Each structure stands twice: as structure tokens, then as C-alpha cells.
């Protein structure tokens, strides 16, 4: 009986950690993993809360300029949002050579924006969706985005300034070639 008791006691002692042993979990390791998991939970909650609510869309007619607003010596640009389709649209105006954003034009369904932009060559990024996440993320991964494949040129010849009108209604074989962007492509 004593022998059986001692064998059982020895088996229990092998499966349980000895005094001072923690099976590899030191206090520093526990603190580190707690910080990693806490950070992951914080950022994922922040991302998903933002995804579910969005932020308010800019007021009608409000153009977000990333440069000093152009003077009257620039060229006229008219952007028309379609009457059917998504509720919200945004058009980003980027310099053709550098890719630097110079302006963002937010539009609601059926609105028309008329603005003056500096002379030069520009690429346009068109985005649409229902939930606005701000000027950087636009409509998030759920929105539709496309970009012009060639720059549009705004220039002056003598006293005449070249003006452009962009209609956001999608057309097959339209005269403004664009390509769709994948969700995280800029």
C-alpha cells in the first residue's frame, strides 16, 4: 500500500510544476502577451466601430483644397453626379507628374459642382458609396473606385482656356478612359 501511495505521489509531482517553475510563462512574457492582445483588440474595435458608423459627409458645394484655392486665372471644371446609383460620390484631383492631391470634390446623387482649378495636367480618382469614412479612406473597402488612365490637360491658348465637364454616369466606351481600382490600391 505504501508503494502504491508513493508511485501515485510521484506521478502527481511529475505532472505539476515544481516550486518556482511556471512552464515557460515568466511575468515579463505574460505582460508582453497581454499588451499585444490588448493592442490588437483596441485597433480592431476602433476599425470595426469606424466601419459601421462612418463620419458625416461634407456639406454640398464644399471642395476640400490641399493647395491654396485657385485664382480666377485657372480653368473651369464641371462635375455632374448621376441621378441614379450610389448616394455619395467623391472626386479626387491629383497632379499628373507627382500624384499629389490638390483637391477633393464631394457630391451627392444628382448634384453638379463647378470649380476653377489651376492650369496643368491632372489624374482623377472617382469614388462612390453609401458610408463616408473621410478624405483619406473615402468610402472604405465597400465603396467603388476608379481612376483615369491618362491625365486631363487644362491649358490656355491665346485668350481661350480649355474647360472640361466630367459626368460620373458610367457609360460603355465613354470618352474618359478609366480603370477600376482594387480595394487597397491608391
Image: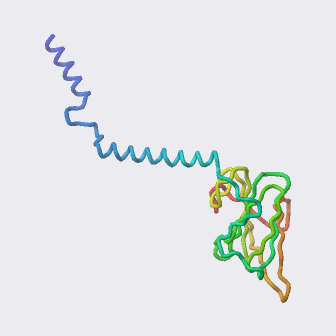
Q: Residue at x 74, y 73 (%)?
A: 151
Q: Where is residue 102 drawn, in percent x and y?
A: 67, 72
Q: Where is residue 24 drawn, in percent x and y?
A: 28, 40
- How many numbered marks does the figure carry? 0
Residue 111 figure quarter: bottom right
Q: Where is residue 182 drawn, in percent x and y?
A: 67, 56
**Taking 83 as reference, is 184 left or right?**
left
Where the N terminus falls, by quadrant? top left
**Taking 12 as reference, is 180 left or right?**
right
Where the C terminus falls, by quadrant? bottom right
Residue 99 seen in render:
no
Residue 138 figure quarter: bottom right
Q: Residue at x 72, y 54 (%)?
A: 144
Residue at the outermost front position: 59
Residue at the outermost left position: 2
Residue 172 seen in render:
yes
Amino acid at each position: 500500500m505504501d508503494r502504491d501511495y508513493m508511485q501515485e505521489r510521484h506521478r502527481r509531482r511529475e505532472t505539476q510544476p515544481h516550486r518556482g517553475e511556471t512552464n515557460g510563462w515568466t511575468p515579463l512574457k505574460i505582460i508582453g502577451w497581454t499588451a499585444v492582445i490588448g493592442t490588437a483588440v483596441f485597433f480592431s474595435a476602433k476599425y470595426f466601430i469606424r466601419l459601421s458608423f462612418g463620419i458625416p459627409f461634407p456639406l454640398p458645394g464644399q471642395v476640400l483644397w490641399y493647395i491654396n484655392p485657385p485664382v480666377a486665372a485657372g480653368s473651369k471644371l464641371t462635375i455632374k453626379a448621376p441621378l441614379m446609383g450610389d448616394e455619395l460620390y467623391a472626386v479626387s484631383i491629383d497632379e499628373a507628374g507627382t500624384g499629389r492631391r490638390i483637391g477633393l470634390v464631394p457630391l451627392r446623387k444628382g448634384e453638379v459642382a463647378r470649380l476653377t482649378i489651376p492650369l496643368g495636367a491632372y489624374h482623377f480618382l472617382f469614388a462612390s458609396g453609401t458610408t463616408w469614412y473621410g478624405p483619406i479612406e473615402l468610402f472604405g473597402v465597400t465603396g467603388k473606385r476608379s481612376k483615369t488612365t491618362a491625365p486631363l490637360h487644362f491649358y490656355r491658348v491665346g485668350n481661350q482656356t480649355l474647360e472640361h465637364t466630367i459626368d460620373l454616369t458610367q457609360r460603355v466606351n465613354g470618352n474618359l478612359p478609366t480603370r477600376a481600382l482594387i480595394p487597397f490600391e491608391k
